[in-house]
Structures are given as structure tokens and as C-alpha cells.
Amino acid sequence: MTRQHIDRFFTALSRRFTGAATVIITGAAAGAVFGSPRASRDIDFAIRLRPRMGRQWEACEAAIRQAVAQTGLDVNYAEDIDRWGMISLLDYARQTRFYRRFGTIEVRVLDPAYWAIGKLTRFLQPDERDVIAVLRRQRLPWARAVRVWGRALRKSPRSLERVRFRQQVEHFLETHGRTIWGASFDAHQAVLTFHRAAGVSVREQ
């Protein structure tokens, strides 16, 4: 997935759908925008129409299908991507960066700290590599990142997925923290900051 793939898809979409819409890119496509492209032909995004009307959605979905057929790219989209998993994306719609405008479609990209929530939830090897590369390139302060991840854990309903997310964040910080933030990075302090933001009790630690 590269910026060229993203631009080609949304150019094709804008030629077929003329309603006002805001798109928030996440997943591998967001990684490409942040400077970490990898082999993928999927574009994951939230899309919100203005106004939110049934006929508008039907027209938009038809346009997406046509853009997929033209470009050969796969897409996964939803009005609210927070419903894609058990771990909350918090106020993700307010945590974005402007990317480009394609006709009446404004395309934004999810903030790296919030984008990483989905990667740390799935936590396959490509996801780990993506998060390492993006956080290094974007120079995201570790304290901001772990507080966002802690708040996501706190906001999420209790489940096995919640337990796994906590363990995966802890493992990620302990294993990759110095690679991202340098030799002075203190994994123990980062995990404690994550726990405090998550509201993890002393007994749980």
C-alpha cells in the first residue's frame, strides 16, 4: 500500500460520488501516509456523510463498489470504526490529521497513537513492525502514546480481548520501547504510566 494507491482509489471514488463526506484512513493505508508502506492492497477507513441520509449511503456504497472494480484495491469501511473491535478507539474522530481533498470528499488520517490501538489489538508480526516504524518516524512521545492506550483499555468493556490488549501493550513496551524511543527509555515507568491511565489497581499489577 502506497500513497499512490490511496490517491488512485479516492480519485476514482470522487468521480462517482459527489456528496459531501469525511473519510478517516486507518490500517496499512494510514501507515503508508505516515511513511511506512508495506505489501497490502487494503484500504480501511471510516466514512461519514453530510447529511446522513439513506439515499446518500446507497449512492456512496455503489460508488465505492465501482471504485474498487476500477482500481483493483480492497476496502473495508464503516460509519463508525470503533465498532470493529472490543478495544475502544475513544474520541478517534476528533484525533485526525488532514491528508487531501478529492472533490467533495475530505480525507484525513487517524492520529498515530489512536491508529496504533487497532494494531496492538490484533498484534500480528506485521502489526508490530508497522507500529515500530510509524512511531519512530512520527517521533511520538512515549508518554502520550501509553496514556492513550491506557485510556482505551479503561474505556473498553471487560473481556478476554481487554486482557490480551493489556498484555500485548506491556510486551510491546518492554520488547520494542528502546528501539523506538532510545536507550534512555524506561519500560518499567512506561508500563506504570499505562496502568495509571488504564485505572489498573495495584493488585492487578
Image (cartoon, grey):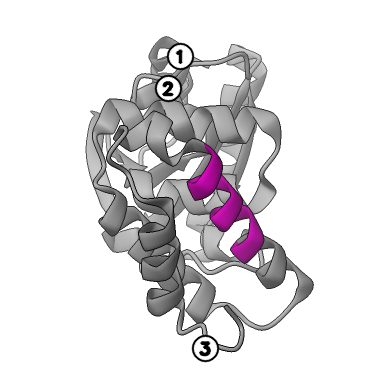
Q: Is residue 92 above or below residue 12?
A: below
Please give left or right for residue 96 compared with residue 177 in the image.
left
* Residue found at x 39% / y 78%: 196
- Magenta residues span 166-175
- Residue 31 appears in which quarter of the rendering? top left
Between discs 2 and 1, the one toward the N terminus: 1
| 2 and 1 marks in contact (CB < 8 Å) | yes
Circle 1 sits in a helix, a strand or a loop, which is it?
A: loop
Q: Which residue is mark 2?
A: 32
Q: CA distance from mark 3 to mark 2?
A: 37 Å
Q: Which residue is at 53% across, 16% downward? A: 1
Q: How many marks?
A: 3
**Neighbours of disc 3 within 10 Å: few (<14), some (14-19), many (20+):** few
Mark 1 vs mark 3, foreground winner is 3
Tag of residue 201: 3
Left or right of residue 22, residue 57 in this image: right
Q: Amino acid at mark 1?
A: Thr
Image quadrant containing the C terminus: bottom right
Where does label 1 land, which residue?
2
Give the image location of residue 130, x and y in percent. Answer: 51, 29
